[in-house]
Amino acid sequence: MEPFMRLCLPLFMLAACSNSAPAPMPTQLPSTGQQPDLSGTSVAHFAEGCFWCSEEIFQHVRGVKAVINGYAGGHVDNPSYEQVCTGTTGHAETVEVYYDPTVVSFETLVKVFFASQDPTTPSRQGPDAGPQYRSIAFYDTPEQKAFIDGYIKQLDASGQYDAPIVTEVSPFIKFWRAEDHHQDFVDRNPDHGYVRSVSKPRFERFRERMPDVLKDTLP
C-alpha cells in the first residue's frame, strides 16, 4: 500500500486521517464559521481527485469566495462518502467553486483546474485510485464546453504531458454536498498525515505553476 493513501474509511478512522453559471442560493455552505457574501458570484464545478486537495487550491485563488466539497457526475441521489467510495455510484469527488467573475474568469478557473492535477491518469490522482477520483471539467453553457475542449487540444499539442489528457468534459447536472467533516478539511486538520504528505505538496506544486492567480494572503 502506498504511504498515506487516502482510503475510503468511516469518519472515526479518517479523523486525524465568458458565460458563467449564476450561483445558486448559498444553502450548501458550511454551517460553521463566518458566511461569505456570495452576492454577484457565479459557480463552477470541477473534479480532480481528492476534494480535500482541490478545496485547498481553489480557496487560495483570487476572486474565489467559497469552495464546497461534494459529489457530482453520478446516478445516485444524495450519496454518502462511503457509497461514493465503492466506485459504483458514478460520482466523482467534486468542488463547487463560488467566484466573482469581475475578478477571476471561468477560463482562468479551467486553467487552475488543469495546472493543479495530472489530467493524464485515468481514474487516479496521485496515491488515490478509483472512478471517484477521475478528472472531470463540468460545463453549464456551450461556450464553456468549447473553451474546455479547445484548451485540452492546446495542452495536448503543447507536449507538456507524456500521455494524452483523459479529463472528461461533462454537462453539469447536480451537486451533492459532502458531509460536514469533509469541509475545510485541510485548514482544520493541518497535521493529518494525508494533508502533510499529499495535500500541502500538491498545493505547493500548483503555487509554483500559477503564482499570479493567488490571493495576497497565503499560509
Image (cartoon, rainbow, N blue to C red):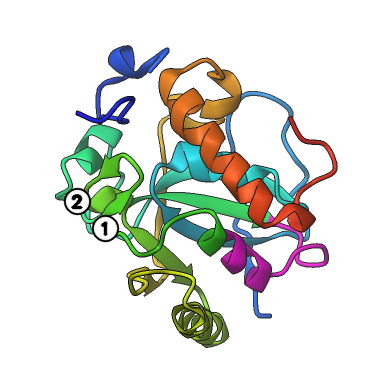
26 over 122 or under it: above or below: above
Q: Position of residue 214 (x, y in %)?
A: 75, 50
Image position, residue 165 (x, y; %): 37, 72
Element marked by disc 1: loop
Locate residue 67: give its quadrant.
top right
Rate crowding at label 2 as few (under 14), some (14 to 19) or many (20 or more) other CA atoms within 10 Å.
many
**Between discs 1 and 2, the one toward the N terminus:** 1
| Residue 45 position in % (x across, y down) | 50, 59
Identify the residue position indicated by label 1 in the image. Answer: 74
Residue range (magenta): 99-112
> 198 above or below 113?
above
The residue sitting at 55% across, 32% down in the picture is 200
Name the residue tied to disc 2.
89
Q: Nearer the viewer, residue 210 or 11?
A: 210
* Kind of residue indicated by mark 1: Gly
In the rendered image, residue 111 lying in the magenta stretch gets the answer: yes
Q: Amino acid at mark 2?
A: Thr
Q: Are marks 1 and 2 in contact (CB under 8 Å)?
A: yes
Q: Which mark is residue 149?
A: none
**Looking at the figure, which quarter contains the C terminus?**
top right
Task: Residue at 49%, 82% (x, y): give it.
Answer: 145
- Residue 173 magenta: no
Which residue is at a point 51% across and 75% down the rendered structure image? 140
- Left or right placement of residue 104 versus residue 193 in this view: right
Q: Residues within 10 Å of mark 1 (few under 14, many from 20)?
A: some
**Quarter assignment of residue 163:** bottom left
> Left or right of 63: which side holds 177?
left
Q: Is residue 76 above or below residue 198?
A: below
Closest to the observer: 52 or 191?
A: 191
